[in-house]
Amino acid sequence: MTDPGKAGDLLGQIPKSKGLPPVHLWNPDFCGDIDMRIARDGTWYYLGTPIGRKPMVRLFSTIIRRDGDNYFLITPVEKVGIKVDDAPFVAVSVEVEGEGEAQVLRFTTNVEDMAEAGPEHPLRFVIDPVTQEPAPYVHIRTNLEALIHRNVFYQLVELAVPREIDGQSWLGLWSGGEFFPIAPQPD
């Protein structure tokens, strides 16, 4: 584990620019894990304490990268591992435009990222095999997703329409010209 001051040191290493830093281009040496965790509800923790400063959380959210099943905070000179309970972001709102096949769903995350569901930002729905509870996700950026908040998911369910796929009727959502199946309809 690296020095507890590392989280603050990371901020000074981020180049100042508009837009997101190009973390996909950075390949610094791995410096170890730090005691930082993103809970399933989107709360960021450092040394077991919630990070209450929203601008700091937003800044850290711009330098997160997922490699395989592992999450890292990346700067041009340092790579540190962090823990993510589920997804690094939570989609906290959805804006709906149009209807049917012309419908567009625009999601906003807890760190103010925006994604328009479609080919570049697909939706996926995972059904827990034990509880049968769905876990909905939207792709936000390279290899990173947002768990769709329960209230937002309820809004999506209200928008769901049936469609036949391979001879089976499914409920799903249209956005960006794509149909995203949620679950098969019972017979």
Image (tube, rainbow, N blue to C red):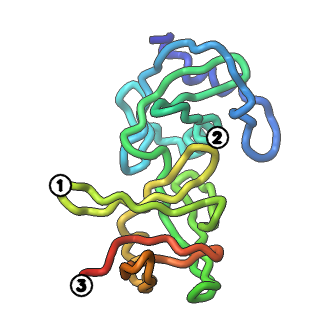
Label 2 or label 3, whichever lies nearer to me, is 3
Measure how far apart labels 2 and 3 are at the Cα level: 45 Å
Q: Position of residue 92 (x, y in %)?
A: 48, 63
The kind of residue tagged 2 is: Thr
Q: Amino acid at mark 1?
A: Val
Which residue position holds label 1? Answer: 130
Q: Earlier in the sequence, mark 3 or mark 1?
A: 1
Identify which residue is drawn at 26% across, 56% down: 128
Residue at the spot of label 3: 187
Dot 1: few (<14), some (14–19), or many (≥20) neighbours within 10 Å?
few
The number of numbered discs placed on residues in the rendered structure image is 3
Asked which secondary structure carries label 2, the reply is loop
**C-alpha span from label 1 to label 2:** 34 Å
User: Camera-side residue: 147 or 14?
Assistant: 147
Q: Earlier in the sequence, mark 2 or mark 3?
A: 2
Element carrying mark 1 = loop
Look at 36% across and 47% down and name the residue there: 40
Q: Tell me the amino acid under the disc marked 3.
A: Asp
Q: In this rendering, is residue 68 above or below 131?
A: above
The dot on residue 62 is: 2
- 150, above or below 43, in the image: below
Q: Where is the C terminus found, in terms of image quarters?
A: bottom left
Q: Residues within 10 Å of mark 3 (few under 14, many from 20)?
A: few
Q: Is residue 50 above or below residue 105?
A: above
Q: Are marks 2 and 3 in contact (CB under 8 Å)?
A: no
* Contact between labelled residues 2 and 1, with CB atoms less than 8 Å apart: no
Separation (CA) of disc 3 from disc 1: 21 Å
Residue at 36% of width from left, 40% of height from top? 85
Residue 152 image position (x, y, % from top left): 43, 70
Mark number for residue 108?
Answer: none
